[in-house]
Amino acid sequence: MRVAFVVQRYGQDVAGGAEVLCRQTAQAFASRGHAVTVLTTTARDYLHWAPHYPAGLLRDGPVSVHRFAADAADPLLASRLGRRIALGWGDWDDQVAWAVAQGPVSRGLLATLKRTAQQYDVVVLWTYLYATTHLAMPLVAGRAILVPMAHDEPMLRFDITRGVMALASGFAFLTPEERRLVDEQHDIASRPQQVVGAGLAPAVPGDATRVRTTLDLPSRFALYLGRVDPGKGIDALFRAHAAYRAAGGELGLVLAGRVLDGVSVPEWVRVLGFVDAQTKADLLAETDVLVLPSTNESLSLVLMEAWQAGCPTLATAHSDVLSGQSARSSGGLVYRDDADYARQLQRLDDDVDLRRTLSTAGTAWATRETWSNALDRWEILIDQILQLRGSI
């Protein structure tokens, strides 16, 4: 089977959740014998799309990657237009201007896709949000699978999003909660769709002793893994952990992830910056609990990786996705507000048996989340689309 993935960024050192999952899925498809081509931009930065990688064709293991230059974006204009549209003041021209200002607009990518689309059995467009999907969808509508990676935000209800949703031949969702949200907003139940989820590669063994000797860490700590970004709820985490500290809590807070420019981090927080896979595994082996404050998730790979490592989790209850994942795995708790965060974190700190129970359940759940199972669901979805196309 020949499959193309269209995604805004792609690379081993790209830290965004959508991009990481796209790369993992591409590798998994290729490992099963499918011919996979990724069409993407030269950018690593998701605000301005400045060139970082060289343009052209290269190999990422068994995957062919074709990178194209992208136009410079205007994030300030995109933010202003996005707010205007969300308040109901914008027209169609404002929405088009918003999509272009946000980007990435890659004319070379679009020209290549238009010329080669018929070569692929399906073209998988990653996330509904970016111009790569907005502009590519009309070119491949008869063979397009959309991976929305949607959460409840104003952009999901924009007219331009409705157009993207209307043209998709099928949908690959990451959780039941995401599928329900998109169907409620866009009535897509009559078209092929699967909750494909994601698989977990074999875990990198963690070494708690090693991370202690290489990094300056609090004696005991809660760990946050991911981009240090207000959009990921990081300010809410600082506030909640401060409430926990004020109530006498003794666990420190460690952040492992790239810090967005302009983020103000309290002096009592230990910031490690971007860490490699081995260091991440070592941190998960050493921490008492992984904390996740983001309300804007369609799937949390971080939760899955924590459970695979036997690490209990504490996630915000204001995300249906995180609440659903935590309930299905039985590997973590959720919290409703700052005071509840303090209570639940203290409970995890005090109760060794609770941590052991969550660890055992999370690990058992993670062993069933394999790429083989995820690819089976992907192939069912693709077969449905091919059958429908053949009957037209």
Image: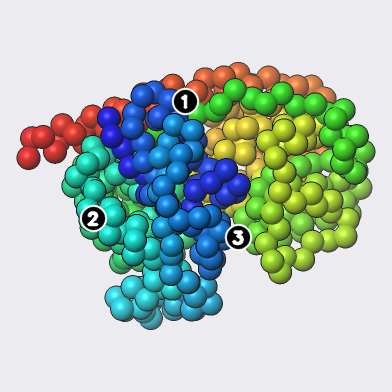
Disc 1 crowd rating (10 Å Cα; few below 14, some 14-19, many 20+) is many
Give the residue at mark 3.
231
Quadrant of res 145: top left
Mark 3 or mark 2, earlier in chain = 2
- The residue positioned 73% from the left and 54% from the top of the image is 237
Quadrant of res 96: bottom left
- Is 362 placed left or right of 161 in the picture? right
* Above or below for 96 versus 126: below
Q: Nearer the viewer, mark 3 or mark 2?
A: 2
Mark 3 or mark 1, earlier in chain = 3
Q: Is residue 83 visible?
A: no
Which residue occupies the foreground of this view, 375 or 330?
Answer: 375
Badge 1 marks a residue whose secondary structure is helix
Q: Separation of disc 3 and disc 2 at Cα? A: 34 Å
Residue type at tag 2: Lys
- The residue positioned 71% from the left and 48% from the top of the image is 274
Q: Nearer the viewer, mark 3 or mark 1?
A: 1
Q: Residue furthest left?
A: 392
- Residue 31 in percent (x, y) is at 43, 25
The circle on residue 104 is none
The circle on residue 114 is 2
The circle on residue 371 is 1
Quadrant of res 107: bottom left
Badge 2 marks a residue whose secondary structure is helix
Q: Nearer the viewer, mark 2 or mark 1?
A: 2
- Residue 94 in percent (x, y) is at 36, 78
- The residue positioned 62% from the left and 55% from the top of the image is 232
The quarter in which the C terminus is drawn is: top left
Which residue occupies the foreground of this view, 40 or 380?
Answer: 40
